[in-house]
Amino acid sequence: MNKNSAKIVATSTVREKAGVDSVQPEPSDSFISSPYVEQVTQRALAYLVAGYPVHFSGVAGTGKTTMAFHVASKLGRPVTLVHGDDEFGSSDLVGKDSGYRKNKVVDNYIHSVLKTEEEMKSLWVDNRLTTACERGEILIYDEFNRSRPEANNALLSVLSEGILNLPKLRRSGDGYMAVHPAFRAIFTSNPEEYAGVHKTQDALMDRLITIQLEHYDRDTEIMIVTKKSGLPPEDAERIVDIVRELRMFGVNNNRPTIRAGIAIGRILASQNRRARADDSFFQMICKDVLATDTAKITRGGQPVMMQKVEEVISKYCGSVKPVKDKVKEAIL
Ligand SMILES: Nc1ncnc2c1ncn2[C@@H]1O[C@H](COP(=O)(O)OP(=O)(O)O)[C@@H](O)[C@H]1O
Ligand SMILES: [Mg+2]
């Protein structure tokens, strides 16, 4: 056989560690701890310390992701984040056969001979769940119900028996892995996104302790908008009142969320403006940010939400003057 030719030496499965991609979360300067935030945190911690996985369920903007990180930070262990995704397969969660590795061996002793060996090894790349289970990290599985139910199968035995099943490694004797005792999992999901009946999702839900999150109370929302925008608290208060009233109105009771309030606040602050009814720029930002969802619903040819936004601005910020009156005022 030609010495320079490549040959297949072995076909076996080896485990390769994925890169370290866990984090140690710490609250940022803009994190707000209110009595409500603390109370939810205490409950979640109690369940986690007792060994139960926690699940924050709530519509968009109820602070699920923020709360998950906050609670995880209290456990003082590294955190691995996974996002639910429709494209997700279970191999994305636990690891997969990633193909082959080439291993070149150059024999330097006999310089006339160049010996090249190519090993073809089927690689098992440890993925996030595997790594988190092995190292005893905190897994945050954000919006887990966006993944197809079968993708989450591996979690069932992790959560009930403390065992991670790695089918591809069974031949090399590594098919089951005991989950590190410090491993904990925090899930989030938005109930609006549950479509149809997913058996696995139900089985998974059954193993979690679910904390229902509502929109923040008014005081917490004002504190968050003040902190995140840098506006004076009285401006944040007006914005929050406008947002909260619109949330109660119309087709979608869950929007606008706190994100809209933060956005209006940030835009105003960056323009050095205030939340005042006589500021036509403020009115326009409110309409752009707040009237998006319901633009199609009209009354007398005018989008209903536009009228409602004006009405609510007047209610909380003083009467809204039509722009043409202001032009007249300026001329007089
Ligand atoms: N305790 C808090 N302190 C400061 N900002 C917060 C807090 N909770 C939520 N927020 C902010 O509110 C917004 C919505 O929160 P998020 O956790 O993303 O909600 P969800 O995951 O439920 O959609 C984000 O901009 C987030 O930064
Ligand atoms: Mg979120």
Image (tube, helix red, strand yellow):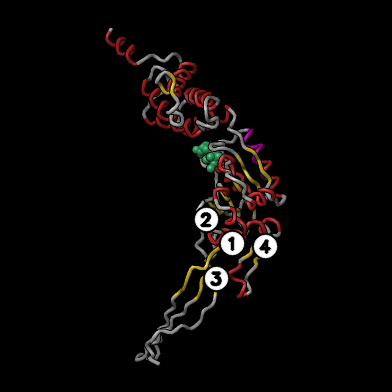
**Residue sitting at the far right:** 50
**Secondary structure beneath label 4:** strand
Could you say which quadrant of the image residue 319 lies in?
top left
**Residue sitting at the far top:** 332
Q: Is residue 108 left or right of residue 59?
A: left
| Mark sitting earlier along the chain (4/3) | 3
Say if disc 1 is inside 8 Å of ligand 2: no
Amino acid type assigned to the residue bearing label 1 in the image: Thr
Residue at 40 percent of width and 31 percent of height: 267
Is residue 188 depicted above or below 165 in this figure? Answer: above
| Mark sitting earlier along the chain (1/4) | 1
Is residue 288 depicted above or below 158 in this figure? Answer: above
Is 123 inside the magenta-drawn segment? no
Which residue is identified by label 2? 88
Amino acid type assigned to the residue bearing label 2 in the image: Phe
* Gap between marks 3 and 2 measured at Cα: 21 Å
Which residue is identified by label 1? 130
- Tell me, for residue 15, which label it has, or none: 3
Residue at 66 percent of width and 41 percent of height: 211
Q: Which residues are magenta?
A: 35-41
Mark 1 and mark 4 residues within 8 Å of each other at the beta carbon: no
Is 40 inside the magenta-drawn segment? yes
Near mark 4 (Cα within 10 A), the count class, few <14, some 14-19 or many ≥20, is some
Near mark 3 (Cα within 10 A), the count class, few <14, some 14-19 or many ≥20, is some
**Secondary structure beneath label 2:** loop
* Gap between marks 3 and 1 measured at Cα: 11 Å
Which residue is identified by label 4? 163
Near mark 2 (Cα within 10 A), the count class, few <14, some 14-19 or many ≥20, is some
Mark 3 and mark 2 residues within 8 Å of each other at the beta carbon: no
Q: Is residue 7 left or right of residue 51?
A: left
Near mark 1 (Cα within 10 A), the count class, few <14, some 14-19 or many ≥20, is many
